Structures are given as C-alpha cells and as structure tokens.
Image (cartoon, rainbow, N blue to C red):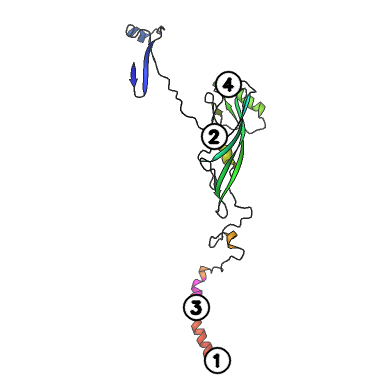
Amino acid sequence: MTKGPGITARVVKLGLPRAAGRLSARFRNRYPHEYTVMPNTRTNAPRGALVFDTRTLGRQAGSARSQQLTVPAPDDLRLELARVPVGTDMHLDVRFEAVTEGVLVTGSVTAPVAGECARCLTPLTSSVTASFRELYLYQHDKHDRRERRDWLDHNYENDEQDDEEFHLDGDLLDLEPVLRDAVVLALPMSPLCREDCPGLCVVCGAPLADAGPDHGHDEAPDPRWAGLKQFNQDQEPRRTGAIDLQEG
C-alpha cells in the first residue's frame, strides 16, 4: 500500500507477464508480475442548474425530449446599460434531439432585464426573450470530425457556421455558454425608458421629461467678451452723470 497527500495507490498482482527488456532482466526477482493501479479520481460534485443529463434521451437518432423549467440567472449576463440580475428566475423552454453526431438543442429563454435609459439615465426594468440552437458533439475521435462537418453542411448549408464547437462531457450537456451568448446578444445596447424620451438638459442635466417644455436657460455669454462686459459696467456710472449734466 502506497500513500500520498490525497492519493492512495495499491499494488495488485494481475498475473500478466512482464515485457522483455533490460529493466525486466535487472529486476527479475524483485517485483514479479506486480503493477501499480491508481485510484479513481472521478467525483460526484454537484452540477449547475444548466447542466443536463442526456442518458434518458439515449443516442438513438430521432429520439427527443422537451423540458420547461425555471433556472437562476448566472453572472455576467450584461452590457453597459442593461443586465440580467444574478440569481433572478429565467424561464427556459428547451428541446433535446439525438442526431447522428450528437445532441441538437433548440429552445428559448425569457429573462428579466434591469438597466438605465440611454438618454436620461432613469432606472428601468423590462424582459428579454432569446432563441438558440446548437449541436453538442459526442466525444468521437479526431477522424470522425470530417463526417461531422459533412453532416453540418448537409443539414445547415444556409446557416453561418461558427468555428466554436461544443461537446458533451460524457452524458452531460452544459447549456450555460450557449444560453449566455443568446441572452447577451438579445440585450438592448441603448435601452430607453420610452421611445420619445427627450433626455437631459445639456446645461443643468435635469431630465427634460420632468422639467417641462418651458425649461430653459439664459444664453451663456461668450467668455471671450467677459472683459468688455466688465468695462461696460465700469463706464455705466460716468454715462449716467454726463446725462444729468446735460439735462441740468
């Protein structure tokens, strides 16, 4: 029995002959027919809410399964002015279909959106609905990729193909990266509190929708004429005195 930090190795006798060579000749009588077997490192770690087990679907082409569920929103579903709050409920309608090369996933997701108006920066809330479709490949060997590309060309010849490929992890299908791309692309880049939002006053920054149509400011003087304005103010008393002398 060999022990280490977090790892236990067992020496078992398998009864298999050793390969001929210098090492076998050198240690002929020391370790006869003994091999080191490492323990299984797979764990039963909890899966995320967007990881699905496809064992119930099977791998028979044509079998399908639909599911409707509510899942918590992952983090970083956001743009500069719009975001899906972390942990809020997202309603998911998804269909899994076994095909020759893997599992074809199609569906839609509806999520709440929070953000700010792009014109007046008023907080706003709304919702967004996004659709998605992606093929998750079985874990085949490299020589099977050409068949996969032929299958895609035949079934989606009019679609734009993405260089990124998604694979099943055994029987597990992680939907989070596909859902993340779909939701973020559907978020508004310039959300508005209303279509005719007038925005903010360029002088004082007040929301024009609250200030009303009479909101305005005196025209700001040109700073290049500030010295002349001060000169006119200094000359005003002299002009007044000259007028009084003429009237007298």
Type of amino acid under label 4: Asp
Q: Where is residue 19 in the image (x, y as percent from the top left)?
A: 40, 8
User: Are the two marked residues, 2 and 1, in contact with CB atoms closer than 8 angstroms?
Assistant: no
The residue indicated by pointer 4 is 144
Crowding near the residue tagged with mark 4, few <14, some 14–19, many ≥20 C-alpha atoms within 10 Å = few
Name the N-terminal-most of marks 3 and 4: 4
For the residues carrying marks 3 and 2, which lies nearer the camera in this image? 2
Mark 2: which secondary structure? helix
Q: Residue at x 59, y 46 (%)?
A: 126
In the rendered structure, which segment of residues is drawn in magenta?
225-229
Asked if residue 4 lies left or right of residue 230, the reply is left
Amino acid of disc 1? Glu
Residue 131 lies in magenta, yes or no?
Answer: no
Circles 3 and 1 in contact, beta carbons < 8 Å: no
Q: Where does residue 156 sit, x and y in percent of width and height?
A: 66, 29
The residue that appears at 37% across and 18% down in the rendered structure is: 9
Q: Is residue 148 above or below residue 192?
A: above
Q: Is mark 4 on a helix, strand or loop?
A: helix
**Does residue 188 appear in the picture of this structure?**
no
Could you tell which of marks 3 and 1 lies nearer the N-terminus? 3
Q: Name the residue under label 1.
A: 247
Disc 3 is placed on an element classified as helix
Q: Is residue 228 magenta?
A: yes
Among numbered discs 3 and 2, the one appearing first in the sequence? 2
Q: Do the residues labelled 4 and 2 touch (CB within 8 Å)?
A: no
